[in-house]
Image (spheres, rainbow, N blue to C red):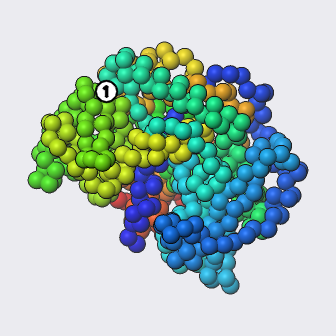
Amino acid sequence: MSTPKALTSRASAVGLALTACLATAPAATAAGASPAASGAGLDRYHHQRLDWRSCVLGPDDEVGRGLESAGARCADVTVPLDYADPRGRTITVAISRLKATDTRHRIGSLLLNFGGPGGPGLANSVLVRGAMKETGARYDVIGVDPRFVGRSTPLDCGLSAGPGLPSAGPDRAGFDLQTARAKSVADKCRATNGSVLPFVTTRNTARDLDVVRGALGERKISYLGYSYGTYLGTAYTQMFPGRYDRVVLDGALDPRRYDPRLMRGTENEHERALDGWADWTAARDAAYGLGRTREQVRATVDRVVAASAREPLTVGAAPEVFRLDGSQVPALLFAGIASDLDPARASLAEQLSVLAGAADGRPTRLSPAFAALLREAFTSAGSAAGSVQTAILCGDVATPHDPEQYWRDIERDRAAHPLFGPMTDDITPCAFWDAPREEPTRVRRDTAALIVAASGDPRTPYPGSVALHGMLPGSRLVTLDGAFQHATFGVYGNACVDDSVNAYLATGRLPGTDRTCVK
């Protein structure tokens, strides 16, 4: 099938921003414990009656119209803010449902998460139904805006930028600026949303999924998660054994490595992905003018990054002009190499052409897509998305508090990775965040999941999928060999991968052995 544009762009953005701790929190709950997970005090949530209605919120609601035209309906699920206090404050989680059309052979409900963390999910029901082909007709496909995301009860710290992985730049001054910004984000979130921040976590999101399961009237749910969504899926299976059916984890994280500095250790994969993009771009020098060889294209990249560190690059034209500095330009490059599909590579080449023109002092014009990306990443338009992503990462796992540790890590990796090291090692708001209330999820139970991974995935590198496969002996691993791709099923257009996933979703039977698909 053709690659849905929204699915590709969402998946390629997954894992971009990894954000960042001061006061002492109440005593942590043990990783194996789940407040009210046994169902005590939760009956009214599990048995609530859902009010299914139109997904369209107004005349400008493109997401709602797309859901409506596909036949989806939407509802709000009420969940506790704090599962340890189920009689206390409540919030809502927005869901969409595309009901099974082959009701005679209906399998059940398939819940989705496309990662982020903090990515919206309502529209994903339509996208995944298409990727599932005839198997999709046998499922109620459920899109979910996780707690505090999208149409769920909102959280917004009033930030000046959206989700992103800013660079500390070439020197100590840039790092000190990032440290001040990280502390400012933590302070703003604490001041505006301090009462809810302790409950913006993956484990609470997993508990919400189980309430959704109950509200849908399902004894078990099936699950498809991409990127961070694989960690959420792992958490669900560990916290709620016996309440899941078929589980697909695409681009898996090693749960032992999950923390706010999630991109540390991915520098080599990102270097290889950037080289692959440079080769592709060099073969199209007539179109982009960035160089005729890999080395020339990489030299252009270095020149643009260095220019932005000296003085912000001005791009765009009135009324929308952006000034991009040495913390932002590397983040754009990082964001652009999550996929080796031609549209993704062309998009980054077009963006770098604009930035190279700005570095040379030439007037630049922005495509609508590039302007939208810059608006979401570097202005207050992305505040809500950045707020939720930061809160989840910081609320899940503790991270070092001392800024000097981050600086030492940057300096240690700078020689080998001058572009990516100052991003992956950079300080985050989590350094100034309150301590998490729970320990992170540990894998102690086997899960018969289907794990899917591309060998060159730069965001959630292949060793993470191999590691999770080793922790889950009953799982199977489908490898897409030779692709620099983050998210594969329904995105990359590889029939071997898509058929493997759909066969499992249709039959519930895992492949007899691990399988390798060729790009």
Instruction: Estimate how packed mark 1 is, as few (under 14), some (14 to 19) or many (20 or more) residues with alpha carbons within 10 Å.
Output: some
Q: Which of the pair 404/355 is nearer the observer?
A: 355
Q: Compared to 104, does 191 lie above or below?
A: above
Q: Compared to 474, does 33 lie above or below?
A: above
Extreme-front residue of the structure: 319
Instruction: State the quadrant of the C terminus.
Output: bottom left
Q: Say which residue appears at 27% left-offset and 31% top-offset.
A: 312
Residue type of the residue flagged with mark 1: Pro
Q: Is residue 152 toward the left or the right of residue 251 in the image?
A: right
Q: Which of the pair 384/29 is nearer the observer?
A: 384
Q: Which of the pair 76/247 is nearer the observer?
A: 76
Residue 424 in the image: state x and y as whole percent: 43, 31
Tell me, yes or no, if residue 256 can be seen here. no
Residue 268 in the image: state x and y as whole percent: 36, 35
Q: Is residue 84 toward the left or the right of residue 190 in the image?
A: right
Which residue position is annotated with label 1? 418
Q: Say which residue appears at 58% left-offset and 27% top-offset.
A: 187
Label 1: state its secondary structure: loop
Instruction: State the quadrant of the N terminus.
Output: bottom left
Q: Say which residue appears at 67% left-offset and 78% top-offset.
A: 106
How many labels were placed on the picture? 1
Q: Say which residue appears at 70% left-offset and 55% top-offset.
A: 92
Q: Is residue 109 toward the left or the right of residue 461 in the image?
A: right
Which of the 4 image quadrants contains residue 247? Answer: bottom right
Residue 383 in the image: state x and y as whole percent: 51, 42
Tell me, yes or no, if residue 359 can be seen here. yes
Residue 61 in the image: state x and y as whole percent: 51, 66
